[in-house]
Image: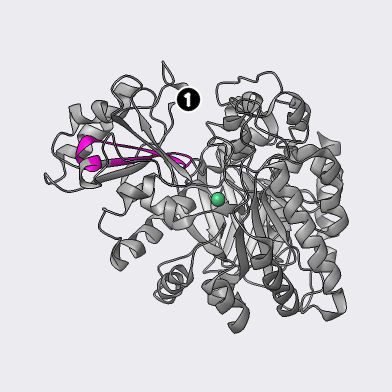
Amino acid sequence: MKLVLLVVSALSALLLSLAPVQQPVVADVVLKNGNVYTVDSKSPRAQAVVITKDRIVYAGSNEVAQKFVGAKTRVVDLKGATVLPGFADAHQHLSGVGMREMTLNLEGTTSLEDFLAKVKARVDQTKPGDWVTGRGWIETHWKPPVFPTRWDLDKVAPNHPVILNRADGHGSVANSAALKLAGIDKNTPSPFGGEISKDKQSGEPNGMLLDAAQGLVRRRIPPTSREDAERAVVLGVKRNISLGWTQIQDAGGSYNDVDIFKKLYAAGMIKLRIYKAVHGPGASATRLLNEGPTIGAFDNRFTFRTIKVVSDGALGSRGAALLDPYSDKDDTSGFLTVKAEDLRPMLLDALRKGIQVETHAIGDRANRFILDEYEAALKAVPADQRKVADPRWRVEHAQIVNPVDIPRFAKLGIIPSMQPSHAIGDLFFAPSRLGIARLEGSYAWETFIKSGVVVAGGSDAPVERGEPMIEFYAAVARKDQKGFSGEGWHPEEAVTREQALKMFTLWAAYAAFEEKLRGSIEVGKLADLTILSADIMTIPAPEILTTRCVMTVINGEIVYEGS
Ligand SMILES: [Zn+2]
């Protein structure tokens, strides 16, 4: 004990001697008695963090931190809570998260009965004839695990049109009133790229609408007003901050979102950092290429420099583009959703103008396609002709990648941006879609890291729940939330806690060109912190799931305090 004390005071003395001698800085906030993980290899642990204005001015011992305390300093005793660099969600859809809060939120629905009870409660508060919409249900763990039907919904909603999105967004269930408004009956053919699911005996539509077929009903819903769109963003921000996210990287959308974000930032209504992309090729991407990026607006909270491309669909609906046919449906291998001739001029322009590109690619064919396109563009516009020499282009999801293609990411400097929760959801059906052999190179986080790239971690909410603790747990456990892991789940692809922490802090910052500004607790960096009720670096993995955010700090300001 004495020896420890000696070492500690020797360390403090050393730190003191390194501290600037001129004028002691008076802190705005001193957080002490914390269990701090800095993600700074030079000094990985600390007890206290000192903040002045928007910056970290000291991380180290309680004793030294005390010297920064002045008359106006707010001193917070963390009582041993765990302090991490502010978590960033490298792939989220912010307004979708907000809309899920505003409409009926069906996340975590445990059975058909539970599902119908939630729908009934919402129907009872809604004027007859008005729409009831919602999102987030998933039947995988219901008993039996089957889709709900229009007839189930009709029992609780005979007088309201209802449409409810499955969590993944690739399917919806509608009731009879909604199908009637859309003019869908047994004679309606399935549209291109979608399916109107029908009852095997009667041939009547059973209410399930897949992919493009959802649009037949959705276009009958009155469009979201500007006011509601703004409210959704505010609600999405509030939820994110309460979970401990300090930045979200908004994967797609349009200038509409950009206008809403700017207005809300200017009004002081958003504290969360947003790193924004818009969809391309198309009008939004062209405008971004012409007008140029926005970097660090609103006190470094808002950056907009990225085009989001979608190159294929999803695995669950067999829309992911595979090199070989699906193992459970050999007449299809999915499809690419972008044409090379539309993409190519945009990629060249983006390199010349310093615009980042991120591309959704799920299947091994889509991943190879986009790597080929990126490689050709990088070759055609060498570094000295680029506005940003290292453009840090990204592949979103990078889910099923042929092992031959994995080393190409490091070689080309491409960042895989991956969502751990996708693996623990998809691995229930991935073996049947892909076969066991193709699961090598699927959700291959550890192989990617070993190949020499950084992996940016995200949630893809509202496709997934969007909770940092679920993502962190999925990354380190690679088991579902009940601890289940099946054949072909490749447990060796789980990452260490240190790697998982980097995925949601420093590496997510790197994917946004912000590793010098954020992503670790270091002097001079922006003061973003996520403070948790338990030490997720050491507790048994299942306890990560019950760990709560107790405080969120963004730009030096305590923006959320839990109980
Ligand atoms: Zn997404």
Observer-nearest of 500 and 336 = 336
Tell me what residue is drawn at x 43 percent, y 51 percent.
97
Residue 26, by quadrant, is bottom right
Q: Position of residue 478 (x, y in %)?
A: 67, 29
Observer-nearest of 269 and 248 = 248
Q: How is the image coloured?
A: one colour
Q: Position of residue 420 (x, y in %)?
A: 64, 39
Quick check: 285 above or below 128? below
528 sits to left or right of 137:
right
Q: Is there any visible trace of residue 60 in the rendered image? A: no
Q: Position of residue 407 (x, y in %)?
A: 86, 47
Query: Which residue does the numbered mark 1 point to in the structure image?
Result: 140
The residue furthest top is 144
Tell me what residue is drawn at x 33 percent, y 43 percent.
134
328 sits to left or right of 136:
right
Observer-nearest of 385 and 205 = 205
Q: Position of residue 491 (x, y in %)?
A: 74, 26
Query: What count of labels does the image hold?
Result: 1
Tell me what residue is drawn at x 39 percent, y 53 percent.
98
Q: Magenta stretch?
A: 163-179
Q: Is residue 164 magenta?
A: yes
395 sits to left or right of 200:
right
Q: Quadrant of the N terminus?
A: top right
242 sits to left or right of 161:
right
Q: Quadrant of the C terminus?
A: top left
Quick check: 372 above or below 537? below
Tell me what residue is drawn at x 73 percent, y 40 percent.
323
Residue type pointed to by label 1? Thr
Q: Secondary structure at mark 1?
A: helix
